[in-house]
Amino acid sequence: MPQAPHSPPAELPSVALKPHGEKRLGRGHPWVYSNEVEMDAAAKAVPPGGLVRLCDRKGSYRATAFFNRHPLIAARVLSRDETQPIDKDFLAGRLKRALDIRERLIGAPYYRLVHAEADGLPGVIIDRFGAALCLQVNTAGMERLTPLLLEALNEVVAPETVVLRNDGAVRKLEQLDDYVEVVQGSLDGPVTLEENGARFFADLTGGQKTGWFYDQRDNRAWAARLAKDARVLDCYAFAGGFTVQAALAGASEVVSVDRSQGALDLAARAAEANGVAGRCRFVKAEVFQELQRQAQAGETYGLVVVDPPAFVKTKKDTAQGLKGYRKMVRLAAPLVAEGGYLLAASCSHHADLESFAEQVKRGLMDAGRRGRILRTSGAAPDHPVHPALPESAYLKAQILALD
């Protein structure tokens, strides 16, 4: 693990902004792109993720930021206070504020504790599972600060177990190695969590991302309201969030589809723990193929959920990924019984809400279905959005009633 920097703000190297970089920063944006800074010798001398003073053309201080000249996002703002040192106390202050928000909103200690830039900690994701924390550190700057971050977490949260789940693809953009490490406490298997009154299990070292997707909490509760007495199809079911909550709400049967046997095993374990295993069936399959197979077999459901992983992983994939959402809805809609409901979601931040909604509409038209939108939503409130960073509003979901 890298050693944390300890330079006082006054001793930090200065990086000069170009005019368009000044404008972006002046509008409150927390990022500065590589073509918005003067890549002079001073900038090139900053180690990846080093702390710098961002200055305007006159040399006046504008912000304290991480700097990495290699990726497109060269600087990520931490503070706009020239007197504020970036130390353990700074990190603890950000963590205390984030904790207070979640405790007020969620209460039970199962939530996203830190959501990167929106919580003032660029590139850091921290999910809380009771006494265990799972961290993703996705920027070189936060990688350098990780030792101090762990100290601050022990001061503010005092977890028993801490996992560094640093194996995300975005780390490659920052030239960071992948690794997964239990840096505090121990794990002997999946941890438990609670959501909307149900119990689930998360694999913090081997599951997707941090092991659970808290962002869909509110959408799962909403979908459960539509599940009573209905057959439900949960596609991309992962560890059973929609599945179990639909069954608990009174679904007559829930069919869960995912290509990961490990995820389905966790979902089945959750169904058993919540006393609904008898009404849940788990199918290991590729979702598009399974949707086609079930349509050919004449299957119908009162509620169909399609909550896929990101179809648009990079900006250049946007057009092709959007076609994927259209196809997803085209294949899912025929399985919705007349008078039933469809929940379609996207976690691709490159696909904005307007574009996603357009593909949902086109998919319905392709399937010859009509209906109405009951709810358009984003992530649960423990996934706040930075006001100047629309990319942080990555999750989109629509619930439709189909005729």
Image: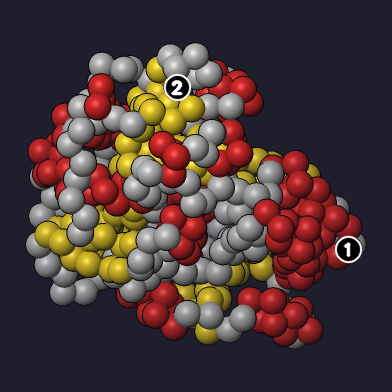
Residue 208, percent across and down? 42, 67
The earlier-in-sequence mark between 1 and 2 is 2
Q: Is residue 146 left or right of residue 293?
A: left
Name the one closer to the observer, 135 or 282. 135
Name the one closer to the observer, 304 or 120. 120
Find residue 166 and report its image quarter. bottom left
Q: Residue at x 54, y 33 (%)?
A: 37
Residue 28, percent across and down? 52, 22
Q: Which residue is mark 1?
A: 366
Quarter of the image that includes the C terminus? bottom right
How is the protein colored in the picture?
A: secondary structure
Find residue 118 and report its image quarter. top left
| Mark 2: few/some/many CA within 10 Å (<14, 14-19, 20+) | some
Q: Which residue is mark 2?
A: 55
| Mark 1: few/some/many CA within 10 Å (<14, 14-19, 20+) | some
Compared to residue 394, the image places residue 247 above or below, namely: below
Find residue 212 and report its image quarter. bottom left
Compared to residue 205, the image places residue 292 above or below, namely: below
Q: Residue at x 56, y 39 (%)?
A: 33
Name the one closer to the observer, 356 or 123. 123
Residue 273, percent across and down? 29, 69
Q: Is residue 30 visible?
A: yes
Name the one closer to the observer, 194 or 281. 194
Distance from label 1 to label 2 (Cα)? 53 Å
Q: Residue at x 49, y 42 (%)?
A: 74
Q: Residue at x 26, y 60 (%)?
A: 164
Q: Which amino acid lies under the numbered mark 1 shown in the image of this protein?
A: Asp
Q: Is residue 68 left or right of residue 132?
A: right
